[in-house]
Amino acid sequence: MADCNALPLVILAEKFAALPGIGMKSAQRLAYHVMSMNEESVREFADALLDAKRNVHSCACCQNLTEREICPICDDDSRDKSVICVVESPKDVTAFERTKEYNGVYHVLHGLLSPMDGITPDKLRFRELLARVADGSVNEVIMATNPTVEGDATAMYAAGLLKPMGINVTRLAFGLPVGGILEYADEVTLYKALENRNSM
């Protein structure tokens, strides 16, 4: 923010800008919006931040974020506990749940392998995943990491740990989106669509 702004306002904008996906212009708009709010609304906003930080933690089973010991998905007896979908972050659980098609359970790694960034296997929740499948009740683990170098490396690493335990490890199919037009698809997307084709 420009030097003409009050220092607390500059600091507030910088805090917003530190959030992922928020540029400095958006951060400035948010900071000015906070200044237009009444004090009670600002206090409620601050309390919501503190409440989430203090009371939300990892589920003891799947590592998703919850305010309970065990999250509602793991605690739901109607879910198929023999299928675990492994995802990078809690946001991915929300995306899958929106489809209303998946009835298994999840495991959140809280990141992807990236040795260049110091993210090694011990920094992710692989140990907890192995503990979950150790009792033999899991038939399939779906690796639902993004089709990036880090996502593929994470999926391969997990498969290397799980296959010796007799677990069927699968990977999400990637290719053309529903409603996609072939002429606009890039080469990698077309290749993946061909590679992951299904019988009719």
Image (cartoon, helix red, strand yellow):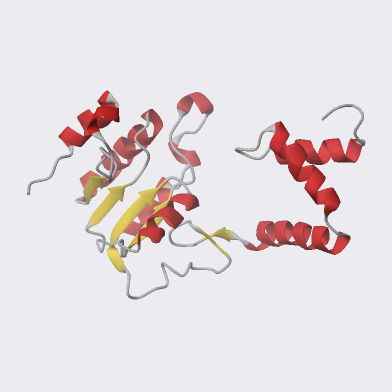
Q: Is residue 77 above or below residue 8?
A: below
Residue 197 on image: x %, y %: 14, 40
Q: Quadrant of the N terminus?
A: top right
Q: Residue at x 33, y 34 (%)?
A: 152
Number of marks in the rendered image: 0
Q: Which quarter of the figure has residue 31?
A: top right
Residue, x 23% and y 47% (percent of image)? 169
Q: Is residue 4 left or right of residue 163?
A: right
Residue 64: x and y in percent read 48, 57
Question: Residue at image x 48%, y 67%?
Answer: 71
In the rendered structure, the answer to whether residue 63 lies left or right of residue 161 reads: right
> Above or below — where is 152 with respect to 116?
below
Query: Furthest residue to the bottom?
Result: 77
Residue 15 seen in the current view: no
Q: Measured from the top left, where is residue 171 in percent x and y? A: 26, 44
Q: Is residue 78 visible?
A: yes
Position of 45 relative to 127 (above/below) = below
Q: Quadrant of residue 26?
A: top right
Write the residue at 90% across / 33% down: 5
31 displayed left or right of 101: right
Q: Nearer the viewer, residue 106 or 10?
A: 10
Q: Residue furthest left?
A: 200
Tell me the quarter of the picture where residue 18 sits: top right
Residue 49 picture location, percent across and down: 71, 56
